[in-house]
Each structure stands twice: as C-alpha cells, then as structure tokens.
C-alpha cells in the first residue's frame, strides 16, 4: 500500500507502516529536524513541505496514494499548548486535511481508483476543543455541509459517523498498551 505522510513523517514512515509493507511515496513536513531525518532515511521520497499548498502537488502523487496519514501539531488542542483550537493556524491544519482528502479522492476517481483511506492522529484534547474542531473534522471527512455535534454533552473516546462521502470512526488509544514504554494517549480517526 502506498501512502502520503503529512506532519507525521518520522513516526508513520519509519516506525509504524514500514514493517507492514506500506511504502511512503510523499511527505509533507516543514520542521527542520524531521525534514532532515526524512531526507536521510528516504532520499528518493519527495517532501512537499507545507501541506496547505497541496493543490500544487503533482496529481500522480494523489493518484498513487492508497492512504493519507496525518499527525498535525497538537499544541492547538493540548493542555501544554494554548488550546486555541481552530483559532490557531496549527489547529486549522485539521480542516486542511479534510480538504486534502476530498481533493485526493477527486483525482483518484478521475484515474479510476478507489478513494483513499484516511488516518488522522492527535491528542485527546481535540475531542473537548471549544472551537468545534473535532465536529468540523468529522463533517469534512464524512462529507457533511456543517459541523457535527456530539449526541451528548461531549465527544466520547470512541465512536463512528456515516456520511455521504465516507464512514468515519475514532478511538482514543494509549501507547503503553501497544509495546511502548510510555503513557501517550492519542485519538485516532480512520475514514474510508
């Protein structure tokens, strides 16, 4: 399976997906250190830099990508950050991801290929963000016109929604239960 890794290049490319037989065909990373690591370990894989410029990327990259994996900066949603959500440029990358996925699917359909599989990862603070980022992400991926709202007082640690474009499921997982020696809770969103 070919994938594009956005803002999560080191983890997705070298740790998680390589052993599964997945092949990185493009990266989108702007931070200098991760860029240097990617260039060192994957010299033949292009890094397109700023993900907000995805419309300028070559069409064949999207046509060839079976999956798009993203782990945008968490500061906009984390307790350690300012928790400004969608009022933070880094938080808005969540909405850019949904736009990128829709763009990729248009290209893949034009090339006679199935839609991409989406994998998004961030801190659980995304679920309690006051600017509605999680509901906007779900709506963007599902193909809904406006922000989705939780059925109760807040978004739960797991769930699913079904829209006209995709089915979307999410779950909060902790790295300590997956052979890593640290507590690191993250929300994972999968859409297809």
Image: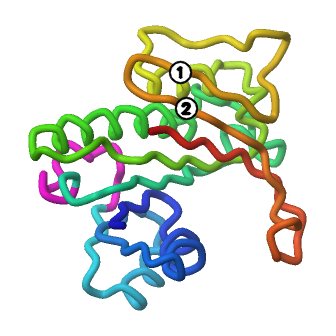
In the structure shown, which secondary structural element does the residue marked by tag 1 occupy? strand
- Taking depth in this image into account, of 150 and 51 the one nearest to the observer is 150
Q: What residue lies at 50% left-to-right and 38% top-to-bottom?
A: 191
Which label was assigned to residue 168? 2
Q: Is residue 134 above or below residue 93?
A: above
Sequence-earlier tag: 1 or 2: 1
Q: What residue lies at 88% left-to-right and 77% top-to-bottom?
A: 181
In the structure shown, which secondary structural element does the residue marked by tag 2 occupy? strand
The residue beneath circle 1 is: 162
Query: Can you say which quadrant of the picture contains the N terminus?
Result: bottom left
- Does residue 76 belong to the magenta stretch? no
- Per the picture, the main secondary structure of the magenta-coloured stretch is helix
Residue 11 image position (x, y, % from top left):
58, 71
Q: What residue lies at 59% left-to-right and 73% top-to-bottom?
A: 16
- Taking depth in this image into account, of 51 and 84 the one nearest to the observer is 51
Q: Which residues are magenta?
A: 49-61
Residue 186 image position (x, y, % from top left):
75, 51
Q: What residue lies at 28% left-to-right and 77% top-to-bottom?
A: 45
Which label was assigned to residue 11? none
Q: CA distance from mark 1 to mark 2?
A: 6 Å
Tell me whether the residue at label 1 lies in contact with that at label 2, contact meaning CB atoms closer than 8 angstroms: yes
Residue 9 image position (x, y, % from top left):
48, 69
Classify residue 158 as left or right of residue 28: right
Q: Quadrant of residue 147?
A: top right
């Amino acid at each position: 399976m070919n994938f594009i890794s956005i803002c999560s290049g080191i983890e997705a490319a070298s740790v998680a997906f390589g052993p599964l037989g997945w092949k990185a065909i493009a990266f989108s990373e702007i931070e200098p250190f991760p860029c240097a690591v990617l260039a060192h370990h994957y010299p033949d894989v292009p890094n397109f830099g700023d993900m907000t410029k995805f419309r300028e990327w070559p069409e064949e990259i999207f046509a060839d990508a079976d999956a798009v994996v993203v782990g945008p900066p968490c500061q906009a949603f984390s307790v350690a950050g300012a928790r400004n959500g969608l009022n933070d440029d880094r938080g808005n990358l969540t909405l850019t991801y949904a736009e990128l996925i829709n763009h990729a699917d248009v290209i893949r359909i034009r090339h006679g290929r199935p839609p991409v599989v989406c994998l998004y990862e961030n801190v659980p603070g995304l679920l309690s963000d006051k600017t509605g980022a999680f509901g906007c992400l779900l709506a963007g991926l599902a193909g809904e016109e406006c922000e989705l709202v939780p059925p109760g007082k807040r978004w739960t640690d797991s769930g699913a929604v079904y829209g006209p474009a995709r089915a979307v499921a999410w779950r909060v997982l902790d790295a300590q239960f997956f052979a890593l020696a640290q507590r690191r809770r993250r929300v994972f969103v999968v859409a297809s």
